[in-house]
Image: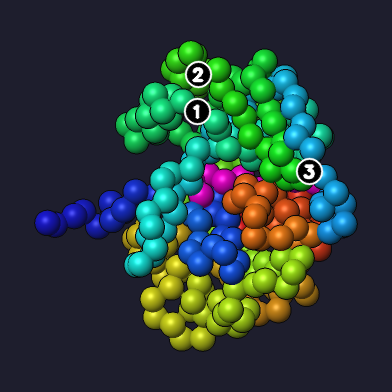
């Protein structure tokens, strides 16, 4: 079928992408509108091991709806879309950018996914009223928001976020230059994705001549309306567009959201910024 030259060949909405590279996660998780913004926070491994008591708190504010799709890898089981909330700092110990999975009933999950697929809800933009709902933390970085199972999701979604929430949000551009940073993560036990930083730079940005990479795919998808720029030439980059960090928790036995939060805080501490900082994609 013919398509107009000014029409993108695939759906491309504003988003922040977080790529978690680990031994346990052999695929990368593509997040729809994943805004990484948190203050520097360093957690020692011995502290992480010591925090195992389940903590329960009551949410005091709204949160930003997040959704993530996992890339399909041949030979691996399919993983359902992940639904989460980016918590207000008031509900996350004063730290921005912390995301917690949503604990929903099957009916609530189906309703929210239906609103996302229909375009009624924009992940990373629209808000969820969780005031009074329960936030649990089973161990460090591992939070979860439990929604009352009798409540309709349609009554919880807000298309008009508060001024406070709008101020906290930053959406990625869909035209022009997009600065992207790739993070290679090593856990407290030394587990790390087998490809080195140079290989990963080539696979994501084509810096070594790889013709089929994430950079070329995004640019082609947008009819070259965007230009992916690898990194910013920061002194922390060990290869073009790539930095390496170590997190103070184990990848094995930790949830995706816990690994993500640990990686975000490690990047913030190393670069001295609050993500996304100067980057559009991380």
Per the image, label 3 sits on a secondary structure element best described as loop
Above or below — where is 269 with respect to 158? below
Report whether residue 234 is seen. Answer: no
Question: What label sits on residue 104 in the rendered view?
Answer: 1
Say which quarter of the image contains residue 154: top left
Asked if marks 2 and 3 touch (Cβ < 8 Å), the reply is no
Q: Residue at x 41, y 45 (%)?
A: 80
- The residues colored magenta run 31-40
Q: Residue at x 72, y 20 (%)?
A: 58
Q: Which of the 4 image quadrants contains residue 17?
A: bottom right
Sooner in the amino-acid sequence: mark 1 or mark 3: 3
Q: Are marks 1 and 3 in contact (CB under 8 Å)?
A: no
Distance from disc 2 to disc 3, alpha carbons, whole Å, reads 26 Å
Establish if 248 lies above or below 236. above
Q: Is residue 235 left or right of residue 153?
A: right
Please tell me whether the stretch drawn in magenta is mainly helix, strand or loop.
loop
User: Label 1, label 3: how many angstroms apart (C-alpha)?
Assistant: 23 Å
Residue drawn where x is 63% and y is 34% of the image: 144
Which of the two discs, 1 and 3, sits closer to the camera? 3
User: Which secondary structure, mark 2?
Assistant: loop
Which quadrant holds the N terminus?
A: bottom left
Name the residue tied to disc 3.
52
Residue, far left: 1
Crowd tier of the residue under label 1, counting other residues whose Cα lies within 10 Å: few below 14, some 14–19, many 20 or above: some
């Amino acid at each position: 079928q013919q398509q107009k030259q000014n029409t993108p060949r695939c759906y491309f909405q504003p988003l922040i992408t977080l790529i978690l590279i680990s031994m346990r996660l052999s695929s990368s998780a593509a997040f729809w509108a994943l805004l990484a913004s948190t203050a520097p926070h360093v957690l020692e491994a011995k502290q992480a091991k010591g925090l195992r008591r389940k903590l329960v708190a009551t949410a005091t504010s709204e949160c930003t709806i997040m959704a993530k799709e996992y890339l399909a890898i041949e030979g691996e089981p399919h993983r359902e879309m992940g639904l989460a909330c980016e918590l207000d700092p008031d509900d996350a110990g004063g730290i921005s950018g912390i995301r917690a999975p949503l604990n929903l009933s099957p009916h609530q999950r189906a309703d929210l996914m239906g609103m996302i697929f229909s375009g009624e809800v924009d992940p990373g933009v629209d808000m969820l009223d969780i005031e009074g709902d329960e936030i649990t933390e089973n161990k460090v970085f591992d939070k979860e928001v439990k929604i009352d199972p009798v409540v309709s999701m349609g009554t919880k979604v807000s298309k008009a976020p508060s001024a406070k929430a709008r101020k906290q949000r930053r959406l990625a551009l869909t035209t022009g230059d997009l600065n992207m940073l790739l993070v290679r993560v090593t856990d407290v036990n030394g587990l790390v994705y087998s490809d080195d930083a140079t290989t990963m730079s080539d696979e994501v940005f084509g810096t070594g001549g790889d013709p089929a990479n994430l950079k070329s795919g995004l640019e082609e998808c947008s009819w070259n309306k965007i230009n992916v720029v690898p990194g910013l030439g920061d002194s922390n980059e060990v290869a073009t567009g790539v930095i390496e960090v170590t997190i103070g928790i184990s990848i094995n036995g930790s949830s995706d959201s816990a690994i993500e939060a640990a990686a975000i805080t490690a990047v913030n501490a190393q670069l001295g910024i609050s993500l996304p900082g100067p980057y559009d994609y991380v």
